[in-house]
Image: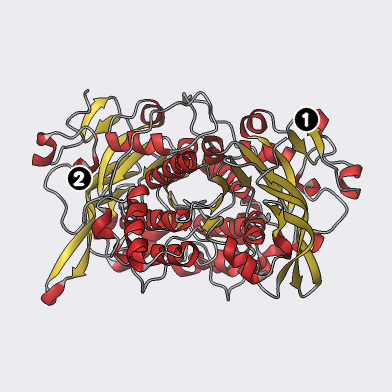
């Protein structure tokens, strides 16, 4: 087996939180998380708001401070790079953001937005950059005359295409898609998803795909990591996760999604209440307070991720049953 | 034959824009029967929320107005009512919950006071009666420990709980119609499932008819009895949910269903590209045109589609405004 492009080990991201009387404590948004992504594949991280999925991705790209662990990207540890080396290495990791309205500078023309990463990292000689911009516009399905327009003159879907072109500008190996289609109408969403899949096939891209939409994840991913309160609770390949989910939280997530497929009759697994306070996580399984199958042992110690099948690990002591 | 609870006839709503009057709802007719759940489906800007606001008499003043057509509720035309008459109906016989539970509640009043306000205004209850009824309602929308939570402020509750409070306010006067405008868009999927279950159960218990506005075909399939697909201010298709999903008679409906990657009963290795609906919705300037407004994005369109507006064709309960409906 070849080495994975991205090998994340024991990644933690914590935020300082001021409490009363000047005390400070740390909120672990991502808590000791490990995963790998093979070259040319898509790993989706799913979970609900506050699960840490976006923070984990930003931690990989080193866009948040206070991270611990190692992020091995094609052989070098991204988290320990010195500033200049980091700037160069950033060419290899690019991000497509959720909101196509606020992630583009309204005062720059589309061509300048797409060119900016090349200018700041210096991946190409200046003279070749305009040609590269034109090539990128074609790749993402925008017309050459649109290069001179400003962001407000584009529709939401077209803006997301500009965001994709910008992410591709430095020939990255890893692209982080952070809820890249969540803000789009369904018809436009289909166009963007097809574009992302075509680009992956043509350019051999590797995606870290952050989404809360399990339908989209089902369509886009090769492997899926399910996060709950900063921890990965289940990791599996696409078919195993959707056809044979093992963790109660994954089961609850999947059963909550309404579907047009009449044959898909899933018993709805209701999880009452809200997640516990992230500043004061319970000592045992973090899902214990909402889990319908909870028993005393669950509250005693955190269950480790253990394999239940090939490429399928679950952090639940009852996963075998 | 029983009269429908709500009947919209040839409704036309115009917005005053720089270029003149633009019809954002054009010749829309539909019926809602007592106790049923009807869904409005479509992309942003198709007019589904605008229709709901028109029913509530909440069109933005000075900008939007009903130009022609009728909105008949219990035989009375709501489009011609004055504010006093509307106020007696709003929140009482027809109520509405909105997309954003964070901003639809007043942050400086407790949730109990906000539920009680509706009861005191419409039901003439005194303070104590309204407060104890508010507690019962919180319990009915399944907020645990309702007795102590009734004195909470909105910021002390989670997003899902706030939406439950909104539902409690909306259902306080046992309305005949509840309009839910994307009630779960801002919520997580497990919370969404809880809110849908709650709406369905409450609808069943109280016999309230529900208008569910959404863009999620899965939610429609699970929640609604009938659906109305809207495109660019016009009705593209309507009919019983199962019939429409199994056999759409309008290419736009077909596109809406097949462009979304759904969770399936059994997932397989096969992952064909999603069906694309090319292009984007037409600009407001073309909304009044005598043509099928979907023609520019439709692969079946021909000269007729581009030059004359398709009439509605009926297929026993299902109606489609498409020249090619017979071929679909």
Q: On the image, which quarter does residue B83 sit in?
A: bottom right
Secondary structure beneath label 2 = loop
Q: On the image, which quarter does residue B79 sit in?
A: bottom right
| Residue B255 horizontal side relative to residue B123, left or right | right
Eye-nearest disc, 2 or 1: 1
Q: Can the viewer see residue A58 in this picture?
A: no
Residue at 91% in and 44% down? B303
Q: Nearer the viewer, residue A35 or B244?
A: B244
- Mark 1 — residue? B315
**Image coordinates for residue B119, horizontal then vertical, percent:** 44, 62
Q: Nearer the viewer, residue A168 or A160?
A: A160
Give the color scheme: rainbow, by chain, secondary structure or one colour.
secondary structure
Check the image and report above or below for B95 versus B303. below
| Residue A34 horizontal side relative to residue B204, left or right | left
Q: Residues within 10 Å of mark 1 (few under 14, many from 20)?
A: few
Check the image and report above or below for B84 versus B238. below
Q: Nearer the viewer, residue A249 or A118?
A: A249
Residue at 76% in and 37% down? B319
Quadrant the N terminus of chain A occupies: top left
- Mark 2 — residue? A286
Q: Chain of mark 1?
A: B
State how far apart marks 2 and 1 are (Cα).
53 Å
Quadrant the C terminus of chain A occupies: top left
Establish whether labels 2 and 1 are both on one chain: no
Residue at 32% in and 56% down? B135
């Amino acid at each position: 087996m070849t080495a994975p492009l991205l090998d994340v080990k024991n990644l933690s991201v914590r935020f300082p939180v001021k409490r009363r009387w000047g005390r400070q404590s740390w909120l672990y948004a991502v808590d000791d998380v490990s995963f790998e992504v093979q070259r040319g594949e898509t790993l989706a991280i799913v979970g609900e708001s506050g699960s840490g999925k976006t923070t984990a991705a930003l931690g990989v790209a080193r866009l948040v401070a206070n991270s611990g662990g190692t992020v091995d990207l094609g052989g070098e540890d991204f988290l320990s790079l010195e500033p200049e080396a980091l700037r160069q290495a950033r060419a290899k990791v690019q991000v497509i953001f959720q909101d196509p309205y606020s992630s583009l500078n309204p005062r720059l023309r589309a061509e300048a937005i797409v060119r900016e990463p090349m200018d700041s990292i210096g991946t190409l000689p200046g003279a070749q950059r305009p040609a590269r911009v034109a090539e990128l516009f074609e790749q993402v399905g925008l017309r050459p005359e649109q290069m001179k327009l400003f962001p407000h003159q584009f529709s939401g879907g077209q803006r997301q295409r500009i965001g994709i072109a910008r992410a591709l500008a430095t020939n990255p190996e890893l692209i982080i898609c952070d809820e890249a289609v969540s803000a789009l109408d369904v018809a436009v969403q289909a166009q963007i998803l097809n574009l992302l899949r075509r680009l992956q096939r043509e350019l051999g891209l590797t995606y870290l795909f952050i989404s809360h939409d399990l339908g989209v994840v089902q369509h886009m991913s090769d492997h899926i990591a399910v996060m709950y309160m900063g921890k990965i609770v289940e990791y599996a390949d696409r078919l195993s996760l959707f056809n044979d989910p093992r963790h109660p939280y994954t089961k609850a997530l999947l059963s909550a999604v309404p579907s047009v497929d009449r044959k898909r009759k899933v018993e709805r697994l209701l999880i009452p209440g809200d997640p516990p306070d992230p500043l004061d996580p319970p000592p045992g399984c973090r899902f214990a307070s909402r889990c319908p199958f909870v028993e005393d042992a669950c509250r005693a110690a955190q269950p480790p991720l253990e394999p239940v099948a090939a490429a399928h690990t679950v952090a639940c002591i009852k996963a075998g049953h | 034959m029983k009269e429908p609870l709500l009947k919209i006839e040839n409704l036309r709503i115009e917005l005053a824009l720089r270029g003149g009057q633009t019809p954002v709802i054009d010749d829309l007719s539909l019926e809602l029967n007592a106790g049923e759940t009807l869904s409005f489906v479509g992309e942003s800007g198709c007019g589904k929320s605008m229709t709901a606001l028109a029913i509530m008499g909440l069109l933005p003043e000075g900008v939007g107005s009903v130009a022609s057509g009728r909105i008949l509720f219990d035989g009375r035309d709501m489009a011609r009512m004055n504010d006093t008459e509307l106020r007696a109906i709003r929140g009482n016989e027809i109520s509405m919950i909105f997309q954003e539970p964070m901003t639809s509640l007043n942050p400086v009043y407790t949730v109990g006071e906000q539920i009680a306000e509706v009861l005191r205004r419409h039901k003439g209850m005194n303070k104590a009666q309204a407060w104890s009824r508010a507690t019962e309602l919180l319990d009915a929308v399944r907020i645990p420990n309702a007795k102590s939570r009734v004195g909470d402020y909105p910021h002390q509750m989670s997003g899902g709980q706030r939406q439950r409070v909104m539902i409690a306010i909306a259902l306080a006067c046992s309305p005949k119609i509840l309009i839910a405008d994307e009630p779960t868009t801002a919520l997580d999927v497990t919370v969404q499932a809880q809110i849908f279950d709650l709406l369905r159960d409450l609808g069943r218990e109280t016999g309230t008819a529900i208008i569910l506005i959404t863009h999620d075909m899965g939610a429609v399939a699970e929640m609604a009895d009938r659906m109305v697909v809207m495109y660019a201010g016009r009705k593209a298709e309507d009919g019983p949910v199962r019939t429409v999903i199994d056999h759409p008679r309008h290419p736009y409906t077909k596109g809406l269903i097949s462009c979304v990657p759904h969770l399936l009963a059994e997932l397989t290795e096969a992952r064909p590209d999603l069906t694309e609906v090319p292009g984007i919705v037409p600009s407001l300037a073309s909304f009044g045109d005598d043509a099928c407004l979907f023609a520019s994005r439709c692969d079946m369109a021909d000269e007729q589609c581009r030059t004359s507006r398709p009439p509605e064709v009926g297929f026993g309960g299902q109606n489609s405004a498409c020249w090619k409906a017979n071929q679909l």
